[in-house]
Image (cartoon, grey):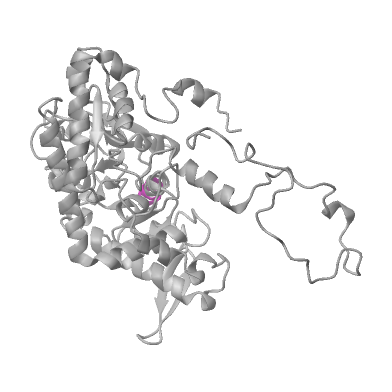
Amino acid sequence: MNDLGGQTIFDLSSAGTEGVTVPQPQVPSPGASWRLPESNFRSSLPDWPEVSEIEVVRHYTRLSILNHHIDRNTYPLGSCTMKYNPKINERAATKAGFARLHPETPDADCQGALQLMWDLARDLAAITGMDEICLQGSAGAQGEMAGLLMARAYHRRHGEHRLRVIIPDSAHGTNPASVTLAGFESVAIRSDARGLVDPDALAAVLDDSVACIMLTNPNTLGLFERDIVRIAGMAHAKGALLYNDGANTNALLGLARAGDMGFDMLHLNLHKTFSTPHGGGGPAAAAIGAKRALAPFLPGPAVVKRGETGHEQFAREAPGPDSIGSIHPFVGNFGVLVRAYTYIRSLGALGLAQVAQDAILAANYLRARLATEYDIPHPGPCLHEFVASASRQKQHGVRAGAIAKRLLDFGVHSPTVYFPLIVPEALMIEPTETESQERLDAYAEAFLQIAREARHDPDLVNSAPHETPFLRIDEAKAARELDVG
């Protein structure tokens, strides 16, 4: 049997096989005085697979290696921060008092959980330079949406009805989508030759109709917006707010704070920067931060502390009259919050700064190694990620997407491809701080070998992957005709 085959658990089923033995119930059987209506009882057994425990273990272990994941090898997906997640985080999140906590538990009976969230909010405020932190966001895009709704409520509270939000041309795709969903008009501004926001282009569209400017800093090219203080001043002079998409906060931990740069609000992807497994679409959590003037508009309820030290009590406080309301049951995606709290407390202030420094070092090392074979549109030091271009390889008929497929044959994941859109044949690479030099060298050698193949054997690259359990698929067809059976 091929251990990497495409069998489902139903293919392994054998009639009569049992994985567990269920004891006879020690409660009255149906027919007693408490008998339920007949409609509550099954007339036949469900069509479940019949397999032994070891076959279940083997099946799901086999599935775990069909797809690439961070526990297998390098996963430098640009802007996604696919870092290794320390297992101490998992142990903390699975403690019974956390994992089995019901969202409707009275505050008096979940003081430990509430204190964790209160402490986490304080930690994140200190890390980002914000005054208040809300933990309700389910993901980064929801954090963006909440921030834009806060901006709208803030301006209306001051008697203004502003219609436009400015976004750079290198922004994450969720930014303009969130702007539209929030009822604003999206205005794109070009990047300059440095790959940064052009202050002159900003000045040309910044007027009293602008509600907010949304920036990612460092931006999606992995470059720090050097004019950020000037940009903040320009925004505030026109009465506009400055929003920070915090997807790239991994480069700033312990080194710089968005609040000190002039940002009025932000979201943090706790599942990226603060370490939670999030491949495959989840789980996620987005902390939403605000400076004091915007704090009343944050979603609620919020965790508050009452009483004196040693006798404090924690409680969920209903949102105030200016709040945009609740965006998540309970106070947030609690399991992710426990993991983020554990990660922060395990590393401490110096450890978090080391995370950012190591991530920056890894990205610059990899950028220098790839520069011999790949174009680097914005040369010079980067922060936690960088964007290379396969334009040189395209001249031999090999595009960025084919390079990404070929990388799978080397047992590593591809970077983000074709994004940001302002770089042709973009390869957006974020190695993170958790990869060793040996792993970085192996990843660089794979890229360099593929570049040589593009010159001498382009068909080899364009027909890749060759070594994966499933070879090249029609991704457009798979997306349009999804079959999960």
Q: In this view of the protein, which residue sits in the foreground, 397 or 316?
A: 397
**Main secondary structure type of the part rendered in magenta:** helix
Q: In this view of the protein, which residue sits in the foreground, 212 or 123?
A: 123
| Residue ID at (35%, 37%) | 175
Spot occupied by residue 5 in the image (x, y as percentages of width and height): 51, 33
| Residue ID at (41%, 22%) | 472
Span highlighted in magenta in the image: 148-156
Picture quadrant of residue 255: bottom left
Quadrant that contains the C terminus: top right
Q: Is residue 1 above or below residue 113?
A: above
Q: Is residue 410 visible?
A: yes
Is residue 238 located in the magenta-colored stretch of the structure? no
Spot occupied by residue 406 in the image (x, y as percentages of width and height): 30, 26
- Is 35 on the left or on the right of 317, as rendered? right
| Residue ID at (37%, 87%) | 310
Q: In this view of the protein, which residue sits in the foreground, 187 or 246?
A: 246
- Is 425 on the left or on the right of 54, as rendered? left
Spot occupied by residue 437 in the image (x, y as percentages of width and height): 16, 46
Q: Is residue 209 above or below residue 38?
A: above
- Is 290 on the left or on the right of 394, as rendered? right
Picture quadrant of residue 160: top left
Q: Is residue 404 above or below residue 260?
A: above
Is residue 152 located in the magenta-colored stretch of the structure? yes
Spot occupied by residue 13 in the image (x, y as percentages of width and height): 66, 41
| Residue ID at (43%, 41%) | 65
